[in-house]
Structures are given as structure tokens and as C-alpha cells.
Image (cartoon, grey):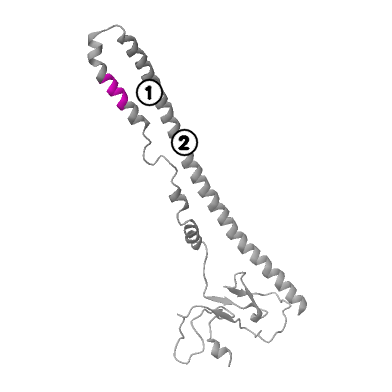
Amino acid sequence: MARCITVQAQQTENIIKEEFQKLYQFLRAEEAARIDAVRKEAKLKSEAMDIRIVNLSAEISWLTDSITAIESELKSEDVSFMLNLKSTMERSEINLSVSAQTPSGALLDEAQHLGNLQFAVWKKMKNLIKYSPLTLDPNTGYLNVIESEGLTRIANNYKTLPLPQNPERLPGVVHSSHSNNKLRLNGAGDERGDGERGQDWRTGWRPRKIMDM
């Protein structure tokens, strides 16, 4: 019996580690995807800002050249140039003012990346996790029955296993616990609930008050 407990503890520990490893793997992949999305957006918006800086620098250079030319023309006392000077200066000022304005949405959208982050990841994780209202008890499984690692399925086992003869273990029976209060009995007074039948076994459920009788 002591050796069986040791084996149970090791098997249970291994399964727990495997299940958590699946969660870790999902979280690492989700983290990588979200960080990648942040970096891609940052790169695109940085490139767009670099282009704006180049264009703005070109406009500033053009304006500087225009001012130099205007100063040169002012010395010549050209009447036609003097008449167009005001409109030329106003047009240059407007173009530079528009180009220097920061466009909407230029910054990183932190709200999109961080808003309800844990909830969004948890909601996505729910699609990967299956819930079973019934959990099989391996301490009640007999020699010819083997349970899945998640304790939600059973199958015939044609190899004789050295199982301890504890009081809970009965031939052809695997007990389980359930957390779904919507399960109903087949009929009034019926001890068995809806279940499935295999070649050498069948599944069902009994209320705890009947199990304790």
C-alpha cells in the first residue's frame, strides 16, 4: 500500500506538471504574439514619423532658400516682386504650419494592447480548456478498467495491474464526483443517472446520499 501511494504521488505530480506546462506554453505564445504586435505597430508608426521628419526638413530647407532669395530681391527694389511678397510669405507659413502638425493616431495605441489584458487572455484560454462535470475516482477502478489522465474517460484494460484492495474498489465499478447540479435522475427513485454502456462495463451516476447508504 505504501509503495502504491508513492507511485500515485509521482504520477499525480507528473500529470500536474504536464497540465501546467500546457498552460505555460499557451501563455508564452500569447505573450510573444502580443509583444510582436506592439513592436510591429511601433515600427510602422516610427517609420511614418521618420518620413514626416524628412518631408518637414525638406520644407524647412525650401523655406530657408526662399527667405534667402527674398532678402536678395529686397535689395533690388523690384516692384512686381514687392507686390507678390506678402502672398508668398503667407503661403509658405501655411504650408509649414500644416506639415508640422502631428497627425491623429501617430502614437502607439497603448489602450488597445493593455486594456483588459488579463481578461482577454483568460477568455481566449477558455477555448482551449474543456470542463467535465464528472471526475472519475481511480481509487475505485477495478483491474479491468483504466482511467484517462484527466480522469474523464475510462476504457477496458486487458492487462492485470497490481492494485491495492482498498474498501472503495468494487468489481466493474468506478465512482466519480460531479459538480453539475443540473444532472437529473432517469426517474423517481432510480439510483442510476444517464450514462453510457460499453461491451463489458457501463457508466452512470448515483447521488451521494445513496452512495453513503
Along the line of sight, the residue nearer the viewer: 34 or 14: 34
Position of the N terminus, as image quadrant, is bottom right
The residue singled out by tag 1 in the image is: 59
**Nearer the observer, disc 2 or disc 1?**
1
Q: Amino acid at mark 2?
A: Ser
Return the disc, 2 or 1, that comes first in the chain's sequence.
2
At a point 59% along the width and 74% down the height, the residue shown is 154
Amino acid identity at mark 1: Glu
Locate residue 146, reporting x and y percent: 64, 74
**Residue 88 is inside the magenta segment:** yes
119 or 181: nearer the viewer: 119
Q: Which residue is mark 2?
A: 46
Whole-percent x, y for residue 40 in the image:
49, 41
Crowding around mark 1 (Cα neighbors within 10 Å: few <14, some 14 to 19, many 20+) is some
Nearer-the-camera pick, 67 or 50: 67
Magenta stretch secondary structure, dominant: helix
Numbered range of the magenta stretch? 87-94
Question: Looking at the image, how many numbered discs can be counted on the residues?
Answer: 2
Question: Residue at 70% across / 84% down in the picture?
Answer: 166
> Is the residue 195 above or below the residue 10 in the image?
below
Pointer 2: residues within 10 angstroms few (<14), some, or many (20+)?
some
Snapshot quadrant of residue 11? bottom right
For the point 55% across and 49% down, the residue is 32
Label 1 element class: helix
Return the x and y of residue 36 as percentages of the image width and height: 52, 45
Taking the image as shown, residue 207 lies to the left or right of residue 74, namely right
- Mark 2, secondary structure of its residue: helix
Residues marked 2 and 1 touching at CB (< 8 Å): no
Quarter of the image where the C terminus is located: bottom right
